[in-house]
Amino acid sequence: MSKVILVLCDGLRYDTAVAGMGYLGHLVESRLASLYKVTGELPTRSRPMYETIHTGLKVSDHGIVSNLVVRRSTQPNLFQSAHQAGKITAAAAYYWFSELYNRAPFDRMDDREVDDESLFIQHGRFYTQDDYPDIELFATAGMLVRRFNPDYLLVHPMGMDFNGETHGADSSEYRNHAVRQDMWLATYLAEWIERKYSILVTADHGISSDGFHGGTTADVREVPLYLIRADVPGKGNTEETVSHLQIAPTICRLLAIPAPQTMKAASLI
């Protein structure tokens, strides 16, 4: 039975990932991972896509229509499904995930660090600043793996989004951050693979050359999906285009838990 880690790299474009993330590229080239291009759902905003990725539903179905909607999810989602199946859940992520799946609004003191088996995200470590260092976020995720051995872990770095919105996607700051993010992630990925985790690395949206997202163009809509399966060879670069809606049912399949009936898109495995 597989455990799963979802690395959701906020604001990571497909072309930037393929060009700059050398360790992930090595895994694809060596057929230890499968690479897909995701045509993201709309709007290309963070909070709506967090919910889409975790529910397998379009925005018009789950109701988180913009970043301004602050409430808990009302739809069956990955954290809820894993929790109900008796799995251990964890997240090192932006505080919007706490608001979606634990409690809303976020309390900076009570909700920053939680270890509570009654919550959908049982072991949560949440940050509130967009420039929170990715290197520290990955270390927190590594700690959660070693301390709690979660069945489902969300890892959510914000550095690509911050650099993209600050400098634009054509900037050296944005491109070089992809290189650094890949380097920081490499050590953790190697350990998690050894621990028999299946790992997905993807993004909620991309960034335009002038630092914006929210629209419909390919630069903000096309993001990568790297799939590393425990003890299963990868397919390399599949050259297939898939949907955000397929991520949640794929993770349910990997966790060997029933996918809610609301998750209608096809699993990738």
Image: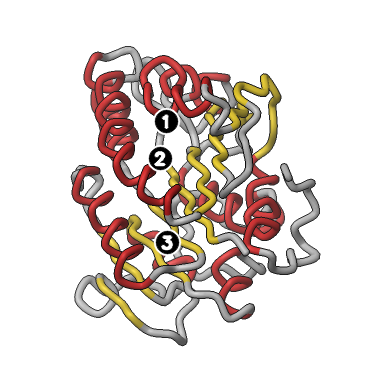
Disc 3 residue type? Phe
Evaluate if marks 1 and 2 touch, with contact meaning CB atoms under 8 Å apart: yes
In the image, taking residue 122 as reference, residue 52 lies left or right, namely: right
In the image, taking residue 82 as reference, residue 109 lies left or right, namely: left
Image point 73% across, 45% down: which residue?
269
Q: Quadrant of residue 51?
A: bottom right
Q: Quadrant of residue 148?
A: bottom left
Compared with 69, 221 (above or below) is above
Indicate the secondary structure of the residue bearing disc 3.
helix
Q: Quadrant of residue 246?
A: top right
Indicate the secondary structure of the residue bearing disc 1.
loop
Reading the image, the residue beneath label 2 is 9
Q: Position of residue 236 (x, y in %)?
A: 60, 24
Q: Looking at the rendered structure, which numbered label has been put on residue 97?
A: 3
Spatial separation of the CA atoms under disc 1 and disc 3:
18 Å
Spatial separation of the CA atoms under disc 3 and disc 2:
14 Å
Q: Looking at the rendered structure, which numbered label has been put on residue 81?
A: none
Spatial separation of the CA atoms under disc 1 and disc 2:
6 Å
Q: Position of residue 46 (x, y in %)?
A: 46, 45
Evaluate if marks 1 and 3 touch, with contact meaning CB atoms under 8 Å apart: no
Name the image colouring.
secondary structure
Image point 41% across, 73% down: which residue?
104
Q: Position of residue 151 (x, y in %)?
A: 50, 67
Residue density around tag 2, few if under 14, some if 14–19, many if 20 or more, within 10 Å? many
Q: Looking at the rendered structure, which numbered label has been put on residue 12?
A: 1
Image point 39% across, 67% down: which residue?
98
In the image, taking residue 47 as reference, residue 107 lies left or right, namely: left
